[in-house]
Amino acid sequence: MATPRCREDRPGRAATGREGSRLTKKLFIRTYGCQMNVYDSGRMAELLAPLGYAPAEAADGADMVILNTCHIREKASEKVYSELGRLRPLKARRADAGEEMIVAVAGCVAQAEGEEILRRSPVVDIVLGPQTYHRLPEMVARATRAAPGRGIVATDFPIESKFDHLPAARTADGPSAFLSVQEGCDKFCTFCVVPYTRGAEFSRPVAQVVDEARRLVAGGAREIVLLGQNVNAYHGAGDAGDVGLAGLIRTLADIDGLTRIRYTTSHPRDMDAELVAAHGDIPELMPFLHLPVQSGSDRILSAMNRRHTADDYRRTVARLRAARPDIALGSDYIVGFPGESDAEFQATLALVREVGFAQAYSFKFSARPGTPAAALDDTVPAAVADARLAALQALLAQQQDAFNAATVGSELDVLLERPGRHPGQLVGRSPYNQAVHVAAPAALLGHELRVAISHVTSHSLAGVEAGTPDARAIA
Ligand code: SAM
Ligand code: SF4
């Protein structure tokens, strides 16, 4: 499974693995935003399977459409309203034919805008926040009976009960599976909507996570990506008290058949000594860490309420590299935060140059309603923010290319996840989270293969099975 973060919307399938003969209705889920939404979409599909809904590839002809939304930046929420506009004629056509199309808006836009969505888009039947989707079957039943225009809104915050009421059976959707272990956030960075849309920090109990991980592995997963808005703040209840993320990873690493563990997204302040040590001594913990820093300027970091300095970040990276010298790093950056001066932006570039990132994402500041930063008036002109974003992205792309190029000539273990675009080609991930293309029989899907990296393609690698005398690499 590719693991893009918060970058794209993903159409379609949220496989449940429980498609059976009773499934007669079509369910189309469009997922926007982060991996946690991808996880949630999968679980919503599982919840609806017993009601007869099977995953569909398109909204046209679907009995139910769920838009699982993201509110992190303005563009993300506007996309939802455009999509609702496109659904209107599809729903009207089905109504003319005497057929139903239930439209639900889930996720963080639903949480943030609630009733407003029904007002702006009467096509919507259900608005449900991220902490209420375990009640989806009941809401669908109510929506089916409700008079047109009587939408249902569920935006309360019972995170605990959500996980307690999700179906236990889970089948992996491939060799790499997401598993949410933590939700919500108490950090309140001044630019971020997450504490308002996902609620207070909550960690699932260890036993519940281990149980879900075992089911995923039994269903074919070889890699598990532990998810949380602030995953390294994890402190789930264990047999002898609270367990941190490092302890959870140690327990999961003992599961037979689980060969790779990753976690995302982390906050630099929660990178404690135990977790750093885990990177040095748990072979299953992959040597890639996404550790967002947002800015290289202490004044901006403070205005963002990140509660660490650029030097704190440098020290954390040094500790990680001491524990695991080959660890590759990822990060997130925001440029154009209100009041950001050119010198402060230069401090960000300096930090990037000094640390060196294998993969990183950067965004222009987007004022989110209700967040403290949205009230700041010292806004950076759009053209300046655009130029800064372009400069930062050029530097990050250069670093990514250099990191990838440095692996040419080496051998990497690749977990083969899906067929490639060319016949006979498979695509997988290296330990450093790079996409790798290789010619290999389909029977190897779901297995790790040692690959000799022969060349770099755009943001990915290509190679041949190690030990193959003169096999050709396929780009
Ligand atoms: N919890 C993670 C952390 O502490 O870094 C980040 C989670 S957030 C869902 C993903 C990324 O979106 C952030 O790291 C930040 O770079 C970006 N982001 C969040 N709010 C933003 C905003 N208002 N404008 C621009 N980018 C934003
Ligand atoms: Fe948002 Fe991450 Fe800050 Fe929490 S720690 S408020 S999720 S950016």
Image (tube, helix red, strand yellow):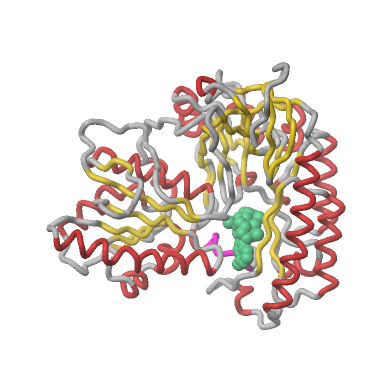
Observer-nearest residue: 255 or 161? 255
Percent x, y for residue 70?
A: 49, 59
Left-right relation of 198 to 277: left
Q: Nearer the viewer, residue 327 or 228?
A: 327
Q: In this view, does 190 lie to the left or right of 213?
A: right
Residue 206 within the magenta-colored segment of the rendering: no
- Ligand 2 is located in which of the four quadrants? bottom right
Residue lying furthest bottom: 377
The total number of labels drawn is 0
Q: Quadrant of the N terminus?
A: top right
- State which region is magenta: 191-195
Q: Note whether residue 170 is visible.
A: yes
Residue occupying the far left of the picture: 98
Q: Position of residue 324 (x, y in %)?
A: 80, 33
The quarter of the picture where the C terminus appears is: top right
What residue is rendered at 73% in x and 16% in y?
469
Q: Nearer the viewer, residue 376 or 396?
A: 396
109 above or below 159?
Answer: below
Magenta span includes 192: yes
Q: In which quarter of the image is residue 463?
A: top right
Q: Residue at 51% of width from left, 38% of height from top?
A: 179
x, y percent for residue 309: 80, 59
Picture quadrant of residue 95:
bottom left
Q: Which is the main secondary structure of the residues drawn in magenta?
A: loop
- Whether residue 187 is visible here, answered yes or no, is no
Indicate whether 304 appears above or below 422.
below
Q: Pick the residue in front: 389 or 320.
A: 389
Q: Where is residue 57 in the image (x, y as percent from the top left)?
A: 35, 46
Residue at 84% across / 64% down in the picture? 347
